[in-house]
Amino acid sequence: MKDDNKDSSFGLIPSNWEVAKLGDIFESIGNFSYTRADLKNELDEGCVFYIHYGDIHATYSQIILDFSKEKNIPVLKEDIVLPAAVEYLKNGDLVIADASEDYEGIGKCIELTNIGNKKVIGGLHTIILRDKCRKTFDGYRGYLLRNNIVSKELRRIATGTSVYGITKSNLSRVNLLLPPLPEQKKIADILTTVDDKLENIESQIAEYTNLKTGLMQLLLTKGIGHTKFVDSELGMIPEGWKVVKLGDIGEFSKGKGISKSDVVSNGIPCIRYGEIYTVHHYVVKKFYSYITKEVAANSKLLNKNDILFAGSGETVEDIGKAIAYIGDEEAYAGGDTIIFSPKEDDSVFLSYCLNDKTVTSQRVKFGQGNSVVHIYSKDLCKLFVPKPPIKEQQKISNILNAVDDKIESLQQKKEEFTNLKKGLMEQLLTGRIRVKV
């Protein structure tokens, strides 16, 4: 920061920046309390777009909501009649979620842009703010509440226990940090460039995820290049494929040991049962936990091409999720994991099959328990799975694994840009780093 700065409630800030109460800059616009039952996703002529607080948390990942792209924004049903004097939202309006189940979501907001002639209203649990004195720049308003000091203040004034809320009156007293308008524009240009990149990456992830879903549905039931099909326990399958019980094509064993207190920062890699349904998907690509040699001596050594199942979980969907271990590294499986060692089949192909709906629909029937659901090898051995020739299994697994690798690469890139954005916001929104205007 340059020497021309001054002291403020935000600490040292540039001398030409201003600190102002939110209520002195913005006026509050009315909202409506319609619920999901009053909404639909099909657009029609003259429809009214509805900004739902839940979508601010879950759907709108960026700070700017661009109506020209119409990101599946819900609309009101045709039979709902609004008051004649309704005030529709405008470009630049801020819509804030006034309730959140966690601290991170308190004060989460979106700035509306490219509304055009569309009719837009704010909904239940939202606070709508409009700049009444033109001290904020279009595209910058959405970042005003993302300043770290402002975020801390929002958490401080939030009330509640399991759900945290903020009121209009409390919000109006929050201090905002305002650079000059030209600097706001430059900062907004930088941050929205990163946001645009993130949005592009998210679109690519969605495209490849949809591609993978389609490929799994096709390859795991139709195979590659088949024209003749026969009926089976799993429906129609290619001629030349078999349907077998999992217990007939391999052997089961159990993981053991490895409590949370056994995990160390460096050591021999291991897989704990909870990681199977949280961080590993289809194939083990990296490790998240490590143990000492002493703990490993009392655990279960994994062999290349083993498949691991989560033996317990909180829901029937969690239990029995499968991942394939195809590495050469010495690694161990903890308790509450079930290990399946195929005799000859491709473990990656089997992993995709075991997580496909044709098999998961069988698996959930075996779940036992209430608060914690368990599944056992005596049940898993009864699962029907398709069995193509081994070369076709390998071709299918290579195709699906290549798409997964692309998705993982994009997710890593997304994380990099997310971290870049956090760093830029921390520096630019506080004046620690200045931009040239």
Image (cartoon, rainbow, N blue to C red):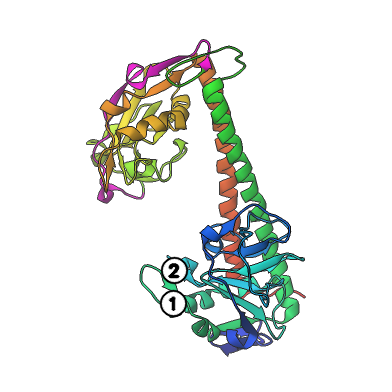
Q: Please tell me which residue lies in front, 102 or 235.
A: 235
Residue 431 appears anywhere in the view: no
Instruction: Tell me residue 77's x, y (percent).
Output: 61, 59
Horizontal side, residue 436 vs residue 145: left or right: right
Magenta span has 146?
no
306 vs 145, nearest the viewer: 145
The residue located at (56%, 24%) in the rendering is 219
- Badge 2 marks a residue whose secondary structure is helix
**Mark 2 or mark 1, earlier in chain:** 2
In depth, the one of 197 and 81 nearer the eye is 81
Q: Name the amino acid, label 2.
A: Tyr
28 left or right of 333 in image: right
Asked if disc 2 and disc 1 are in contact, CB closer than 8 Å, the reply is: yes
- The crowding category of the residue bearing disc 1, from other C-alpha atoms within 10 Å (few below 14, some 14 to 19, many at least 20), is many
Q: Quadrant of residue 2?
A: bottom right
Does 201 sit above or below residue 356?
Answer: below
| Numbered tag placed on residue 158 in the rendering | 1
Q: x%, y% of residue 280?
A: 43, 41
The range drawn in magenta is 237-265
The residue where tag 2 is placed is 103
Give, as a three-letter code, the residue at label 1. Ala
Residue nearest the observer in this picture, 331 or 344: 344
